[in-house]
Amino acid sequence: MHPRSLVFLALLLLVPTFALKAQSSPTRECDLKSLQICALHVAQDEVGIITMPFHLTGANLLWIAPFGVGTGIALDKDAEALRSLGVDKNREDRFRKVSDYGGLYGPAAAVGAGYIAGSVLHNDHLRETAVLAAEAMADSMILNKGLGYAIDRQTPRQGDGTGRFWPHGTKTWPDGQSMASDHSILVWSFAHVVASEYNSFATKALVYSLATTVSASRVVAREHFPSDVFVGSALGYVIGGYVVRRRLTESTWDKFALSTVGTPNGRGMQLSYNFAR
């Protein structure tokens, strides 16, 4: 099984899909005892993230403009950067392992360990941080899977190595999911949540150094182009911040409800929004 699939399955222990049967719960917090709330939070996040472009203001240009310029520069230098690196199988294998352990296994293990330690030690802040990080990573993975198929970009190991978008149109789709980088979007969403919840210089230096190392390793391993990790890192950072901010305005999300509903084919899931509240 691919490493990304293993991590995604691990995250599902905390953030299940809608296929899980919902039960009534007295809490609005995501927890192993109220898994339907976790699914609801992820659904809310996806709706909010996807519709975010419709709610942008002039102030958002402060980060949108640099992001667009940075992406354009990275795209222009992608092929040149990979040619400069050259091909070295041993080096690529080493950095692939670095990115896998730092961007997939490490954050997933930290989420699990944080949740368990927080529960055992009755440290609500630590447990909440683990839950928020898991939700942010699940949000990132779900969104990025859709983006990967929509952008349809070849990796440095595919085609002529220049990272073509939709290289054969719809004839051979999907050809690749190089943009954005899964590892980068996952580790940066994780890092932003942890850095926000534990707002110390040491914590920020640790998690952001980890995220930077993972992103750079994906390029050195010839798994992604610089623009792939740049876009993935930016999106992951934004998603991590979005999840933290959403918790601060939880009353808005109380208007959403997840419940079971009878259908001609049996029981199903229903996501509803109360406009009257």
Image (cartoon, helix red, strand yellow):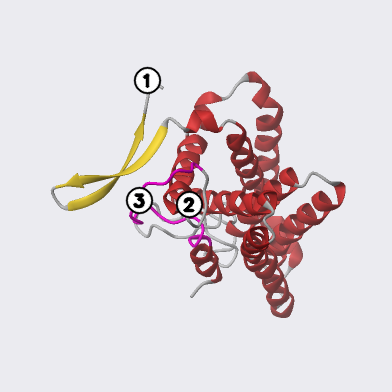
Q: Where is residue 181 in the image (x, y as percent from the top left)?
A: 60, 56
In the picture, the disc for residue 110 is none
Q: Residue furthest bottom?
A: 90
Task: Give the spatial CA distance, label 2 vs label 3.
Answer: 21 Å
Instruction: Please tell me whether mark 3 sits on a helix, a strand or a loop.
Output: loop
Which mark is nearer the camera, 2 or 3?
3
Question: Label 3 sits on what residue type?
Answer: Ala
- Residues at discs 3 and 1 in contact (Cβ within 8 Å): no
Residue 228 visible in rendering: no
Residue 20: say if magenta.
yes
Q: Where is residue 235 in the image (x, y as percent from the top left)?
A: 61, 44
Q: Which residue lies furthest to the left in this view?
A: 264
Residue at 49 percent of width and 65 percent of height = 9
Relative side of 242 to 28, left or right: right
Going from N to C along the chain, the mark reached first, 2 or 3, is 3
Instruction: Please tell me whether mark 2 sits on a helix, a strand or a loop.
Output: helix
Q: Main secondary structure of the magenta part?
A: loop
Q: Which residue lies furthest to the right in this view?
A: 201
Q: Residue 244 occupies which quadrant of the picture?
A: top right
Viewer-nearest residue: 229 or 261: 261
Residue at 86 percent of width and 47 percent of height = 201
Label 3 crowd bin: few (<14), some (14–19), many (20+), radius 10 Å: some
**Range of residues picked out in magenta:** 11-28
In the picture, the disc for residue 276 is 1
Q: Mark 3 points at which residue?
A: 22
Image height of 29 relative to 89, above or below:
above
Residue 173 visible in rendering: yes
